[in-house]
Amino acid sequence: MPKILIIDDLEENTSLIKEMLEGFITGIEVQVVIGGREGLEVARQAPSAFDLIILDANMPDLNGFEVCENYKANPDSALSPILMLSSVFVNSEDRVRGLECGADGYLCKPYHMEELIAQVKALLRIKKKEDELRANGEILRAALSKSNTQLETANTQFKAMFDSSPDTICLIDEDAHILDTNLNAEHLYGMSRDALIGSSMLDRFPHHLREEFSEKIAQWLKTDKSGDWQSETGVEHPGIAVAIRVQRFHYRNRNAILMNIRDISARKALEDQVRSAQKMDAIGRLAGGIAHDFNNLLTSILGYSYLAKENLANGEPEKDIDQIIKAGERATRLTRQLLMFSRKQMLPLHPIQVNEVVQDVDHLLRRTIGEHIELVTLLDEDLPYIISDEGHIEQIIINLAVNAQESMPDGGVITLETRQVELLEERVWQDNTFPAGIYGSLRVSDSGGGIPDDLAKKIFEPFFTTKVRSQAMGMGLSMVCSIVGHCKGFIELKSSPKGTEVIVYFPETIIDSKWRRTPSDANLPTGTETILLVEDEDLVRQLTSTVLSSLGYTVMEAHHGEEALRIIRDKHDSIHLLISDMVMPKMGGPELIEAVKHENVTPFKVLFTTGFSGGMDDLSGLDEGSLLKKPYTRASLARKIRAVLDE
């Protein structure tokens, strides 16, 4: 019910106005106060209780202008509209003064009753609308306050989760500048977040990876799909391995990339341990076959050696000696296969011919899979060269063949096939796109029962296995996947109830003639220079000395580094080349060279030899030109010496 307050100093005026309002406006309540001062007090005590105040302008104790001005002094509480009535102040200046004091309407006496009623009704309608607006405003302010509180809480929670993430999260723009990052970035990069923001993400990568990272950014910006990349990172922490997950999205009306960077160094270390254990498991499978082959080779070597000795009297030992050489070469290949297979790390890649690797591993593989499995080998003579490592390809073949063998417990056929393939369309594997072109393929297929579809999607995952945990670690096919990715290749898996085939594709590489093998029977280079040979193994030293002498060289011998140092001090003027084993008692090859640096001797060339296949810290600073690995042949020794002397 609208409530109206009438303030006037004459009671007959208030009575008349009250009677008119109640007679023409239904549903209202009218209160009358005599005098301006008392009326102001009532209005102040209940500033929002009245829907309209009708105020006489001319009152002796406190006129209407003063009452209006004092009441409206606090606009937050004085919400009632005021209609001012005047019989004295009737000119325009008085009306302006009244409105400036806060009056919402101004009527001069004598006024028409209809005009008064119309003014009152209009001001009541305005008051009602204002009350509704204020009520809605309160509701909106409450809702907004609640939303702000919820948003602030959500922002606080998000920031806590963002900063507490164990991964580094970086937001970068199209130019690779960091827009934002979480606190873990400070730990990974050794810089404050403030310093990282605005800097280039390219600076967080070693120089040799920056071009690849730029190309990745361009690829990620072209697609809405998430992507993955494993690499090294960190100028401040070189060698840290990370897995990067990216997602493109719009940030403040521009394209951006969200990068989730996970430090997988610990995982890599664990994988290395598991990989070593996996290799040991595979080597255990090979041990019987290796022992069998070595016993056969040793039997051949010893038997033909005795025959050659007996046939010396007849003057025909050549045939027996040829057989000894063949057996020795087979033993060399078998040893190389085993040593390559046992390596722990991904090796530097170089051009290889897969057919040659298949031929080398064929005999060993037949021993591994057992006599109940038939092995069929099909080699494409036009197979292109690829970039990989012999040990990598051998691991792929053995792991795939062993898995194929285990799918055929009652026997079957494993087909090992190489082929040159021309892909007419690009292929996608593990979120990476491989262009159309020439590829070398390696296919391992079996005649087993196939792989169920739900398992086919998981077989390349680390630690996934369908065998009893005590019998397998689930890293064999994961290693295959890792090696293939390292060699820039991809894998296709096809399976049906009639069998399974795994096809590995490697991109073709064009090689120059220096990578092609030189025939072993080519004319061997000779020389007349003086060579100091340092070797602690008597049989090897005597054999090498004999070979060098047969090639025309003058040879001086030393049993170890200390003896060699004494010879160098006395005869350094005549020495052209030092051939030294890496590891020897008293003083090894590197220590010998370090000691020579402090002697005032004539410079000479150096060639190291070693029986180790890798993993030695001493080999890290050597290039292929200054190192000859054992066992070496007469031909490889002759060519290496000539290459070192002539360079």
Image: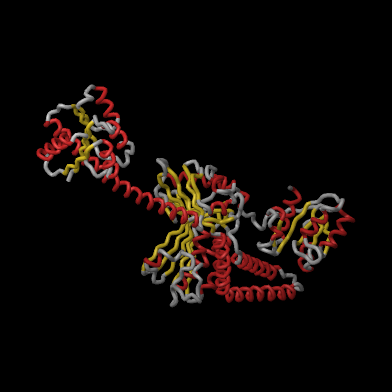
Relative image position of residue 587 (x, y in whole percent): 80, 63
Q: Which of 556 and 20 is in front in this view?
A: 20
Is residue 370 positioned above or below 60 on the image? below
Relative image position of residue 57 (x, y in whole percent): 24, 30
Q: Which of 552 and 416 is in front in this view?
A: 416
Relative image position of residue 295 (x, y in whole percent): 64, 76
Q: Is residue 617 visible?
A: yes
Q: Nearer the viewer, residue 76 or 170?
A: 76
Is residue 381 positioned above or below 310 on the image? above
Q: Residue at x 51, y 75 (%)?
A: 370
Name the residue at the left extreme.
23
In this rendering, position of residue 74 left or right of residue 556: left
Q: Can residue 419 be seen in this view?
A: no
In this rendering, position of residue 289 left or right of residue 113: right
Q: Which residue is drawn at 45% across and 49% down?
A: 258
Q: Residue at x 44, y 71 (%)?
A: 413
Relative image position of residue 154 (x, y in whole percent): 40, 53
In this rendering, position of residue 487 left or right of residue 623: left
Quadrant in the rendering for residue 613 = bottom right
Name the residue at the right extreme.
570
